[in-house]
Image (cartoon, rainbow, N blue to C red):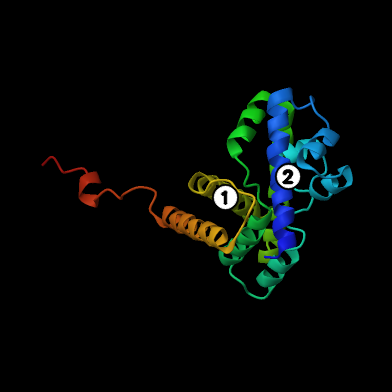
């Protein structure tokens, strides 16, 4: 990690934190991008290198598509015979660098207060799910009508989100991202993937012994 990367990550986190603080204090429409930039100490032009809008700063949605740089590599791995779950794991780990690690409690409060913000957050999540669905479809070579890519994208997306929430519970939010934190996230992701494997490998219910289901001959 370079100093520039660390500085950019800190600036991005500062923007998210300040945007949420201002929204909680004044409402979503009670402050401007210029006021947010002044609070963080950056220019308006610099702001748009990080976020496409003020609402996106509050939500933590980066202006950069997290799959843009990694998607084609993910698809290429599939065409080369890569295993889907292993490749999805690598994709999640690479997107961790751009993940929102600011305190999520303020965001949840804002989503409850601001229906329009909640709708925008949902739309963003749905767009990301559709993008991941298409990447999985191309990775696996599945047909257009095959429901598997969509199901896989939904399951993996929720698992990744759950892992991030759990990670933030265990690690105080911080602008600095070092190897130790990345390793901790990877370890937690592997733990959750293992639990998911156990869940889907387990029988739906314990089989009832045949003798207990057979009606005895009354004679």
Give 105 or 88, whichever is nearer the viewer. Answer: 105
> Quarter of the image holding residue 53?
top right
Q: Residue at x 71, y 65 (%)?
A: 2
| Residue 144 in view, yes or no | no
Give 67 or 184, whichever is nearer the viewer. Answer: 184
Q: Quadrant of the N terminus?
A: bottom right
Residue 136 at x, y = what percent? 67, 59
Residue 72 at x, y = what percent? 75, 66
Give 77 or 145, whichever is nearer the viewer. Answer: 77
Count of marks, rendered view:
2
Q: Residue at x 71, y 37 (%)?
A: 18
Residue 69 at x, y = what percent? 76, 62
> Quarter of the image holding residue 202?
bottom left
| Residue assigned mark 2 | 61
Q: Secondary structure at mark 2?
A: loop
> Quarter of the image holding residue 21?
top right
Q: How packed is label 2: few (under 14 Cα within 10 Å), some, or many (20 or more)? A: many
Q: How packed is label 1: few (under 14 Cα within 10 Å), some, or many (20 or more)? A: some
Q: Residue 15 got which mark?
A: none
| Residue 138 in view, yes or no | yes
Q: Secondary structure at mark 1?
A: helix
| Residue assigned mark 1 | 155
Q: Residue furthest right?
A: 45
Q: Residue at x 79, y 48 (%)?
A: 50
Tag 1 or tag 2, which sits nearer the N-term? 2
Disc 2 to disc 1, how far (Cα)? 21 Å
- Say if 187 sits above or below 123 in the image: below
């Amino acid at each position: 990690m370079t100093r520039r990367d660390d500085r950019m990550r800190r600036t991005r986190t500062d923007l998210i934190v300040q945007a949420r603080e201002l929204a909680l204090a004044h409402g979503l429409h009670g402050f401007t991008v210029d006021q947010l930039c002044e609070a963080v100490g950056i220019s308006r032009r610099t702001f748009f290198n990080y976020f496409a809008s003020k609402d996106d700063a509050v939500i933590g949605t980066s202006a950069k598509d997290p799959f843009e740089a990694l998607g084609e590599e993910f698809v290429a791995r599939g065409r080369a015979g890569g295993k889907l779950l292993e490749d999805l794991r690598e994709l999640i780990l690479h997107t961790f660098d751009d993940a929102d690690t600011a305190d999520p409690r303020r965001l949840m409060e804002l989503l409850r207060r601001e229906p329009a913000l909640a709708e925008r957050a949902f739309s963003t999540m749905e767009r990301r799910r559709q993008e991941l669905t298409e990447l999985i479809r191309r990775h696996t070579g599945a047909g257009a009508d095959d429901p598997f890519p969509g199901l896989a994208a939904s399951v993996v997306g929720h698992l990744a989100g759950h892992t991030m929430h759990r990670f933030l519970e265990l690690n105080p939010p911080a602008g600095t991202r070092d190897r130790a934190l990345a390793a901790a996230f990877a370890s937690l992701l592997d733990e959750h993937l293992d639990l998911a494997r156990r869940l889907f490998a387990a029988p739906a219910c314990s089989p009832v012994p045949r003798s207990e289901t057979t009606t005895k001959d009354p004679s």
